[in-house]
Amino acid sequence: MSANWLNGKDNCNAHQILDAVVITDVLIVGAGLAGLSTALALPESLSITILSKAALEVCSSHYAQGGIAASLDKNDSVADHIADTLIAGAGLCAADNTTNILSAGQQAVQWLCEQGVPFTQIPQANKKYNTEQKVFTKLQTADLHLTKEGGHGCRRVAHADDATGRHIMEALTIKAQAASNITILPYHEALYLLTDNSDNRCQGAQVFDHIIQRQITFHSRAVVLASGGLGQLFQRASAPNVCVGDGVMMAWQAGCRLANLEFIQFHPTGLALGDSSFLISEALRGEGGRLYCPQTGDRFMLEIDERAELAPRDIVARAIAEQINNNGLGYVHLDVSHLPAEFLQEHFPQIYQTLLALGIGITKEPIPVAPTAHYSCGGVVTDANGVTDVAGLYAAGEVAYTGLHGANRLASNSLLECVVVGRNIAADLPRYLKALENLDTAAIYESINLSAPTIWTAPTLKDTQAITLSSFITHPLTSDDYEDTDSNIDTNNQAGKITTELKILMTTYMGITRTAESLEQMLIQIQQWQQWLEKSELSQPNINASDDAMTIDKLAHFQLARQLQLATLIVQSACQRLESRGGHYRRDYPNLAATARISVIEPLSNQAICPLSGINNPTSEIQKHHKFVQSEQAV
């Protein structure tokens, strides 16, 4: 049975024919660069279903400006790219995975060229035209214009103007929509992953269809998590509103370890104008942009790092934050007015036009900027092939932790990771499916351990530190806590209020600088909210019971409960890292620890003590209601 109800299109009108249970070979949760790269690289013989939580363009990949980093210049080398990545990662990069991923950089960019991505070219390559056949020759990586960004020792970033993500996503989406074996479903939100308790194998997901507002069970032979990051837990974030870390939580509930959640990267130069989430690309600094104090006119980065504005992001972001604390203005100035106006308009058309519409002419005046939550360097533990701890479950992109980014991501390495790991998954997944085919009888199936090396090998980590989860509540919730004085305000409004306050809390106490006192206060506050939510009649919808179907109201409470639980995991990880490293800076522990260790949170099922959460592991109950039938799967 195939899942190609829409013939590869995202035409939502076909939803009226869907059943409550759907079977597909491969289910991909997320329609960003990691998800589409995986889908397009998988064999066409497989039926592939891609879920998008909202419209297809609502993903972080679409908004990526700078570009994709790879060793493409004749004077560059993979070894140099690796060295720059390891320096930015501050001792926490996984050397093997870093080498694996970055070594595939040229092939990944060439693959994007072949998919039709219109990368900006060097002038002499811009018109490679065959007058006899009247066709353009295929774009090669040697033709691409390269820019430089913070932390890179040379020009290494291929780009498509200053809207690289949009151009990449438009090209790949066209390809995916044209593929007869790929079905794209916008407005489908994954709630839980389905696992078989007998062998800890992932076999689908429970999904909420926002179009017809009901649940659908998707059964698959493999699942790829490509759901993005968690930036929307913060007040100022570059990520769209769908990025709340639900993929991380689904994997944790299903049996995966999480690593380094405390390492949240803040982009140094978000536009500091109202509540804007618009980023000012690092490439502007790569081309000569300078940071100044608005009050004194001092170019402050010269005194902080020899690389000045091109120091790694954590260093620049902390420097800007310190300036803002001192000047009280909420921003510093990024000035590019000394660069030729024609150059700025040609190379940064999106930034130029967007800011001009807001009354800022970058050729003549500085840009107000401030750090904004941008990227989660931690996530679901995987290897360079996207393999997780759960058989049949892969992860790629910001949701995953390969160890490439360490304690601080090197600029423009994230798009590369999406493509490389996505293509690696596509190469490994057929091997896994073939292994499943060989388990063709129930007796044989039950006698084989799917964690065995011949079937599935979980990723390994070196130099780890286990994060202990415990309850930090010291002030029990009272009847007056978080209860609006207006009795007509319903629990949904209260949940919305908590969501807003959580963003403020995360920004204030889990931002660029942290202390033990503030983190512990945060945990107390979050868990008081969790107590309120558990007492709310809508807080714990039983998604398995036929008489208690998920509704929009219940979904909002479910989402909030998941965000609060994720926040506790992040904060407890930050509490227990007693050092300052990369994107994690502790005022009370300003120095590096002697040994760089990876923070690891064991799966939910392994937790002896679990804090109040509003989140339980649903997979065993789901299996009672939706027994996986292997024989119905398309081969």
Image (tube, rainbow, N blue to C red):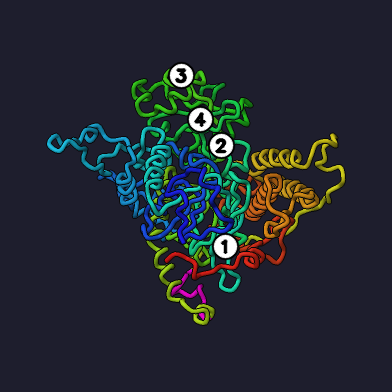
Q: Residue at x 52, y 40 (%)?
A: 55
120 relative position to 441: left or right: left
Q: Which residue is mark 2?
A: 372
**Image x and y of residue 189, in percent:** 58, 49
> Front-most of 201 and 553?
553
Q: Which of labels 1 and 3 is toward the front?
A: 1
Report helix, strand or loop for mark 3.
Answer: loop
Report helix, strand or loop for mark 2.
Answer: strand
Q: Locate the C terminus and report the quarter of the image it occupies.
A: bottom left
**Image x and y of residue 391, in percent:** 51, 67
Q: Residue at x 52, y 82 (%)?
A: 443
Q: What residue type is disc 3 on?
A: Gly
Which quarter of the figure has residue 498? top right
Which quarter of the figure has residue 569? bottom right
Mark closest to the chain's N terminus, 4 or 1: 1
Is 163 inside the magenta-drawn segment? no
The stretch of residues the image draws in magenta is 447-457
**Image x and y of residue 254, in percent:** 60, 62
Q: Which residue is mark 1?
A: 256
For the residues labelled 4 and 3, the Cα–Cα distance comes to 23 Å
For the residues labelled 1 and 3, the Cα–Cα distance comes to 48 Å
Residue furthest toward the front? 17
Q: What residue type is disc 1 on?
A: Cys
Q: Which mark is residue 361?
A: 3
Q: What residue type is disc 4 on?
A: Phe
For the residues labelled 4 and 1, the Cα–Cα distance comes to 43 Å
Sort mark 4 into few (<14), some (14-19) or many (20+) by Cα contacts within 10 Å: some
Which quarter of the figure has residue 149? top left
Q: Are marks 2 and 4 in contact (CB under 8 Å)?
A: no
Q: Main secondary structure of the magenta part?
A: loop
**Image x and y of residue 613, in percent:** 72, 55
Q: Which residue is mark 4?
A: 300
